[in-house]
Image (cartoon, helix red, strand yellow):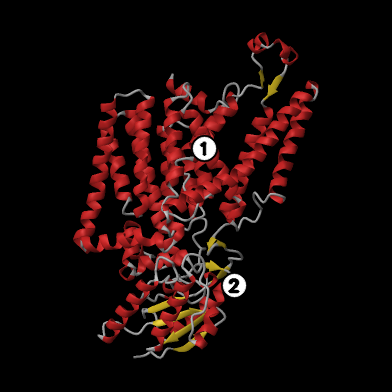
Amino acid sequence: MGKEKSQAFRFRAFEGPVPQAWAAFYRLCEKVLFPAILLLYPLRHIRYGVEWWDTGYNYGNFLFMDRMDPMWVFSTYLGNALGHLFTKLPFGNRMLGLNVYTALLVILLALSGYYFFTKKGKLPAWIAFLGELLALNLCWCPTALLYNYLTYVLFGAGVMALYCALTEEKNCYFVVAGIALGVNVFVRFPNLAEMGLIVGVWAYGVIRKKKFLCILQETSWCVLGYAAGALLCLGYLSLRYGLGEYVSAIQRLLAMPAEASGYTPVSMVLSQIENYRHNLTYAGYLLLFTALGVLGFAVLPERLVKLKKLGYTVCVFLGFYFLMMRRNMFNLRYTTKESVFQWGALFLTVTIVLGLVTIFRKKAEPQDKLMLGMGILIILITPLGSNNHLYSSINNLFFVAPYTLWVLYRLLRALPQEWKLPQNLFQRLPALGKLSKFRIFTFPAKAMILSALLVLFVQSMGFGLVYVFSESGGGENLHTAIEGNDTLKGMYTSPDRARVLSSLYGYVEERGLEGHDIIVYGGSVSGWIPSLPYYLNMPFAITSWPEMASYNLSVLEADLAKLTEEIGAGEREVPAVLLEAGLREQLEEELGQIVLGEGASQEDRDAKTEALFAWMKGYSYRVVFENEKFILLLGEI
């Protein structure tokens, strides 16, 4: 009986008996094809991603973890440790190998989300698959940022365990959820905010009308697991590095918002609110198009129903074209995040609205309230600790998208073809008798929802297939192999980037500089080059991203002073210095009057540049190689 009901439920989109051939094909998709796609799809871009900023910067941190700034070592420790482990595995000495290893976390997210929603959430497999595929396509962040994806894995594990704990009433799952969230603090320190997931325990307790002591007991199990996970990690770090080192690093991290204004809690929250406010403008347009459709269906003759449906559908897509061309809601340049950002933000907004309506609707099922409620918490908590605005939430929809699609699917099926105004209204207000036959047709609402979902999937698919992170935008013309560099063997990038990298690495190899310490400095935002230590296989002598506002002048001066002492004691060699070509004039003048970009103050920017150039004077640095992108200098004692 249960099995027959389940099959009927899964194929409810088809009226009448389900053909055996189709049922067999669906089971094949559910068991094999859908999981296989989710397994392989995250590997589509493993041969791309050679850019100057985040990807190589993080891989360099993994490879040279002992050289990292302690603040970043400890605030993102488990991500760095996992990445360092990957560099020790077969092919971990190449970027292609690391791209495969780091993509495993994305695969884990997609598959765990798929099986969770189909096995525990009882969603149809095709809904779960489409939700996970949507989440994969909206992933814009490089997989090299393990502190993000490992965060999502443990956050997702906490969500799944908490769901099982609340629905199956097993205390062991509360402990598991707590452990996952406690350990997650050591993946990324701002993950402390994930304690907010405990709101789900109390909200569900109220929904199920549990006794206060029962909810308190469940909370206690969560806290016990959280403390166990956090203390286990803290104990390990204390034994290996010393508790004082960890505390000092975290204190620096907490002081960072004073130097980088984008990381203050107020700034992070306000940026989200501003993103939602702007997105509501586009949502307003969609609601207006829907209202006009309802009015048109009511006014135009009923016998023209097919013509009205066709005409309204065409008008909807004309409306989308208007939003693209005149209101810049999106574009078709899939190498940019702007092609999909507003649609992703609209999906977040819809999820939050659906969740709030469901939570406060008395007749809604407890499972719907729990799932959507946890989805809201994921959306709101994920961006905290980041300056990426709503992009962070859009990047983490693995445990959100499937259930939102499921609720929308059920909503579309539940909506009647039309609504009539209640008759008792006309009994109380006889003056409105002329409206007694007025009907509200729901086709415009259904058409708008389906059309918006179609555009979301088309845009996200185009974005997911084309977009490759490259600095602040997306890479283009990524078809040129990088010759002669073992680290980048098998990777492809743009012709210009391949040429300058190959020529620089050729000189490094010729002079036997691999393994030699290096300082990289780019100056302006367009000149940042923190990836180069990894690409050249040259350990960074100080941080590989010294332009960052969080790496302030006092830290730079302290690191250079320490480096000077170690060189004088014979413990370190005089490092090579790699500058971005935009600093050529400043190098010639030995001045630092350059603009570095948002974050640091102008005084700090000039002072850091001047401090580095002054330090270089002490070692008689001279230019030994340059091309249109880089200037390489060597010094001597």
Q: Earlier in the sequence, mark 2 or mark 1?
A: 1
Residue sitting at x 60%, y 57%: 336
From the image, tell me which residue sits under label 1. Answer: 351
Question: Looking at this view, is 480 or 377 the one in front?
Answer: 377
Q: Amino acid at mark 2?
A: Pro
The residue pinned by badge 2 equals: 495
Left or right, 66 with reference to 11: left
- Measured as percent of width and height from the top left, residue 111 is found at 43, 44
How far is the residue under mark 2 from the one under mark 1? 42 Å
Q: Is residue 162 visible?
A: yes
The percent coordinates of residue 279 (x first, y second) are: 59, 45
Label 2 or label 1, whichever lies nearer to me, is 1
As shown in the figure, which amino acid type bears the numbered disc 1? Thr
Number of numbered markers: 2
Q: Position of residue 304 (x, y in %)?
A: 80, 25
- Residue 278, compared with residue 25, is above or below; it is below
568 on left or right of 486: left
Task: Say which of 568 and 115 sits in front.
Answer: 568
Q: Which mark is residue 154?
A: none
Q: Nearer the viewer, residue 121 or 423?
A: 423
Tag 2: Cα neighbours inside 10 Å, few (<14), some, or many (≥20)?
some
What residue do we see at 19% from left, 60% from top? 239
The crowding category of the residue bearing disc 1, from other C-alpha atoms within 10 Å (few below 14, some 14 to 19, many at least 20), is many
Residue ranking furthest to the left: 239
The residue lying at 32 percent from left, 84 percent from top is 573
Residue extending farthest to the top is 427
Mark 1 falls on what kind of element? helix
Q: Quadrant of the N terminus?
A: top left
Taking the image as drawn, is residue 127 in sight?
no
Quadrant of the frame with the C terminus? bottom left
